[in-house]
Every structure is written in structure tokens, then in C-alpha cells.
Image (tube, rainbow, N blue to C red):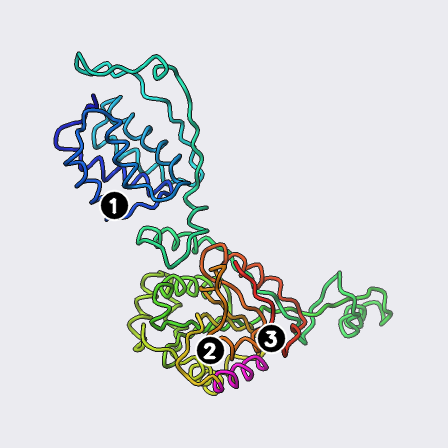
Amino acid sequence: MMERPPGHLLNHLLAFGYLLREMGVQVSPGQMLELIAALEYVPLTSRENLHATARCILVKRREDLPLFDAAFAFFWRNLTGHSMDDEMLYELLPTLRLPRRRLRLPRRQPNNHADDGDDQDSPEEQEQVNVVLTYSANELLREKDFGQFTWEEVQACKALLQQMQWRLDERPTRRKRPSRAGRQLDFRRTLRQNMRYGGEPLQLVWRETRTQQRPLIVLCDISGSMERYSRILLQFVHTISNGLKDVEAFVFGTRLTRITRHLRQRDIDDAIDAVTGQVVDWSGGTRIGDAVKGFNFLWGRRVLGRGSVVLLISDGWDRGEPELLQREMGRLQRSCHRLIWLNPLLGNPNYEPLTLGMQAALPFVDDFLAVHNLNSLEQLGEKLSALGAARPARGQHSAIQRG
């Protein structure tokens, strides 16, 4: 018979659901409520009844079955076999948050405190066996779509974003700097340095071209169709703004709003709250063409130039005129070194850019990339660090690159 402290079953069930979520099993609060309601009709005379009931309600995917079985054996063995109380239990749970955690799960030993007459473990169950469970919550989080994140996963994603290192490809400038490995002779410094020797050029001084990071401009769609992704993507924009120099950030729905100053706050939550308080068209309609036109005419001369790179983040759903979007996208592409469109819907293998907005914009996009999970952001980082000095071939739609 399963031994359980009276009055604590609900706490144990909630803690068990927390453990499953930490191990990557998708368990919703609704499923936990269903399990609690179902246990009113299930006789808890053995662990098998509880295991079968929880397995039926909490597991929705076949690939989660081994994780559930290992978690159940680990959790309820410690709880019942060693009489673990609530305080010891909650001291154990935080250790499971570490990435790539290895849990050694021995099979439950015979319960010496069980009442006489209770079912005893079979000889096979008394054998010492080790079940090694390897999982990484971070790896599962990197592959999960932003639109399916729970509140806890949003917080974990925020921490992972802050750990990312960003580097933007540098561009050559017209200025030179002294360098021993340079290939261009610096006549002025050569003559000045050798004046002490009577003007004879005894020591040559070389120089090379100075490089500088390209400016980065981010235009992020915060309309209603992007609501599932907006906050995570704004966290990404905040991270890249603080990780690189010379970054300008804008958001748009039906109008364009500059948020560069708000993102300078070091705390990401304060920065996002400042942005949401400033933007008046949050989760509204979308007029991408009007927003791009406003950027071209009001901000283009100020922030474009010097080999700038533009990231436009949107799902392409547009209520404006396709002709306007097409014209302004062409103007924007001619004004920058690279125009990259990031679409969260592109992470779906069945997605096709068939909307009028996407059809109008794609001929003027240099790179069409997915931005639906953390892996896609890492791929974007690799792309930004290796853009190259030459502009890509333009005038035709580039190949779709899925994350």
C-alpha cells in the first residue's frame, strides 16, 4: 500500500506536476485539475492506480512516456520509500532546474515502515538497478516555438537571451591606422620617424584600413497578429541593443514609434514596460507599407548609411496597399547594405508566403529567415557576423531559409 502523509496529497501532486514541466513534459494547469478530480473516483490502494491515472491524464505525447515513468519512479520513491516530508521535497526540486542534469533513479526499495499485510515488493523489484535519465530543459526550450511558451518558459528564455553574445560584421572605412601587418606604406610616418637619422628612410612604417561595426536598425511588428511573439521578440531587441553599438529600434502597427531610448534601460522588464507604455497601437491593425514609408522619410537619412543592416520582424499580414509596401521596400533596400525579413511563421514547415503583403515585399528582401525559437535566433547571429563586404545580388526573391 502506498504510504502518504494525510492532508498533503494535493501538495505532492502539484510538486510532481512541477517536476514534469522541468523535465520537458508539457503539463498544463487544466490537466492537473483533471487529475485531482479523477482521483476522487480512483482507489488509492497501490502506486499502480495512481501511476496509471496520472499517466493517462498528464501525458499527451508518446515520446513523453519514458520521461513520465522515470519521473514518477523518482518522485514517489523518494516521497514514500524514505518518508520525505514537504520541506525536503521542495529543497530537492530546485536542483532539477540545472541544465543537462543527470538523475540516478534506483528502483524503490522495500518499505520497512509499511503496515503488516501490505503488498511487498517482488524479488525483481528488490534488485538494485540504476536508471540514468539525461535531459536538458534548455535544449527543449531552444526548439520550442515562442508562441507556445508558458510564463515560466518566458522567464527562462529571458535568462538565455541575456547570455547570448552578438557580433555584427564590420565594414571597411576610409580611415587608416598603423599596423605591422599592414600592406600599405605610410609615407608620412616613415619620414617623420626617420628624421632623427638625417632623413634617410631606415625604418618603414605600414598601415591598414580601419574597420567599424555596421549600424543595425530593427523594425518590429507589434500588431494583433504578432501578439503571441511580440514580448519575446522585444526581449530579443533589448538584448541585441545592449550587446551591440549603434543600434536603432522601432516598433509599428498602424504607426511607427522609435523605442531606442527606452531600450537603454539595463533591466529588461523595465525596458519592456516603458515600451508598452509608450506605444499606443499595441496589438492593433497592421500597415507595414505606411510604417516603412514613415521610417524612410523621417528616419532614413538619420540612421541609414555607413553600410547599415535592417532587420524587419513581421508575419507579413498587412491591411495597407501592396503597391505602397512594394515601393517603400524597394526604397529601403536601396538605402541599406542588407535587408533581412524575420518571420515567426516561417518556422512552420507548411508555411508559404502567400499573403499580399509578403508577395509585395519579398522581391526586395535580401534574406528571408525564421524567428520562432531560440535556435533561429542563434542562426540569425551567425548570419549577422558573416555578412561580408559585398552586397547580395538583388532584383529577385532570395531563397527561403527556415530555422
> Disc 3 residue type?
His
State the extent of the magenta-drawn residues as a range. 323-335
- Answer whether residue 327 is magenta in the image: yes
Residue under the image location 32 percent in, 72 percent down = 283
Name the residue that disc number 2 marks: 357
Disc 2 on helix, strand or loop? helix
Q: Nearer the viewer, mark 2 or mark 3?
A: 2
Neighbour tally class for label 3: few under 14, some 14-19, many 20 plus, Cα within 10 Å = many
Q: What whole-number distance in Å separates the C-alpha atoms at marks 3 and 1? A: 50 Å
> Disc 1 residue type?
Gln
Name the residue that disc number 3 marks: 337
Q: Quadrant of residue 91?
A: top left
Of the pair 281 and 76, the residue shown nearer to us: 76
Residue under the image location 17 percent in, 15 percent down = 115
Residue 113 is tagged as none
Q: What whole-number distance in Å separates the C-alpha atoms at marks 2 and 1? A: 40 Å
Residue 31 is tagged as 1
Q: Is residue 301 above or below residue 248?
A: below
Q: Can you give x and y, in whole percent of width and height, for residue 145 in the image?
A: 41, 56
Q: Quadrant of residue 235?
A: bottom left
Q: Is residue 265 above or below residue 44?
A: below
**Given contact means CB atoms under 8 Å apart, are the residues at marks 3 and 1 in contact?**
no
Q: Is residue 77 above or below residue 10?
A: above
Task: Report the magenta stretch's main SS.
Answer: helix
Q: What whole-number distance in Å separates the C-alpha atoms at marks 2 and 3? A: 22 Å
Q: Can you give x and y, in whole percent of width and height, for residue 90 in the image?
A: 26, 35
- Answer whether residue 210 is magenta in the image: no
Q: Quadrant of the N terminus?
A: top left
Q: Can you give x and y, in whole percent of width and height, for residue 3 in the image?
A: 19, 23
Of the pair 86 and 76, the residue shown nearer to us: 76
> Disc 2 residue type?
Gly
Q: Can you give x and y, in whole percent of width and height, for residue 154 in the image?
A: 35, 55
